[in-house]
Image (cartoon, rainbow, N blue to C red):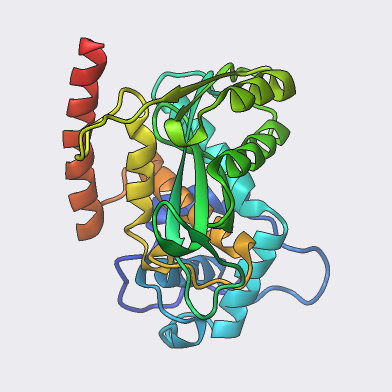
Amino acid sequence: MSPPVTRKAYLTDLTESQWELLRPLLKLPDGGAPKTTDLQEVLNGILYRLRTGCQWRLLPHDFPPEGTVRRYFRYFKRTGQFEVINDVLRKKVRVKEKREEEPTLAIIDSQTTKATRTSGQRGYDAGKKINGVKWHFMVDVLGLLICIVVHAANIQERDGGKMLLAKAANKGLPQLTKVLADDGYSGQPMREHVREKHQWEFESVKRTELKKFVVQPKRWVVERTIGWMSNFRALSKDYDTDPKTGEANILLGSIYYLSRRLTEAPLVKEDWICEKNEEKLAQLGKKIAHIT
């Protein structure tokens, strides 16, 4: 593999410590001609597009060719490597925070995102009055992504939640015993489904009746995770013909934050602003947890 290209760094580039963390986790196809593309530059190109939201063919010329970067992205997506890497890094962060590798409690929530003319699927969310897709997140108590599902926004939250929980169950999660959600997932049939299908306790936390934002005990961490994703402009709307691409982009955003957390990489401006807001939100969450 060729040495890294000498160029002025972009704010989205991986640091050397981040690259050393990720490099052993990437699996390339066997056989074929010797690989001459610098894989670190390929990942830098993928992250540049995720952060800036540019089209593939508008990648700066000092990255590897657009077709090469896109081909590697599709290979990593198709082989499920983003999900595997996210799981490995999530466990490392949990251990670093002096917790067990696997969570006992998970929190789920959804986010409706507007579709564009290139969206492969879309539906009308009557509650949010948005024509687009719906993201379903499952996170642990640290806000670390466990699982993600993307589907058309006209699918009910309970049905999407069942898809999310089924996908999470396939991952194993041997220590998981309880799932928290908002009242969009509520209802006795949902509780019974989760208990009978997955043997997990399911609890829905009701929103406040006041017409303003109020931090909910424990559930606020999933809102913070959704906020993290807003730093990536490729996730500002749904531009993808394949919902699996949207899932891969969210996993890639999670990998970026996990690797930064493990290596203590320096923050760019948007991350610094987000982290300051996270500190304020965490303080509110602690106050509410103390009261309740």
- Say which residue appears at 65% left-offset and 68% top-offset: 74
Instruction: Tell me if I can see residue 116 in this picture.
Output: yes
214, above or below 232, in the image: above
77 horizontally vs 128: left or right = right
| Near-viewer residue (202 or 34) | 202
Name the residue rendered at 53%, 31% in the picture: 91
**Residue 246's quadrant in the figure?**
bottom right
Where residue 192 sits in the image (x, y, percent)? 65, 20
Task: Please report the residue visible at 43 percent of the width from the left and 60 percent of the height from the top.
Answer: 113
Residue 209 at what x, y percent from top left? 26, 31
Using residue 127 as the reference point, say whether residue 122 is left or right of it. Answer: right
Query: If the image is split into quadrants, where does the C terminus sit?
Result: top left
Question: 271 or 147: which is nearer to us?
Answer: 147
Image quarter of the N terminus: bottom right
Q: Nearer the viewer, residue 202 or 285?
A: 202
Whether 290 is drawn above or below 9: the answer is above
Viewer can see residue 268: no
Q: Position of residue 57 (x, y in %)?
A: 50, 87
Residue 233 in picture, x, y percent from top left:
36, 67
| Up-down relation of residue 255 to residue 39 (above or below) | above
Quadrant in the picture for residue 187 = top right
The residue at the point 22 percent across, 12 percent down is 290
In screen coordinates, is 93 left or right of 157? left
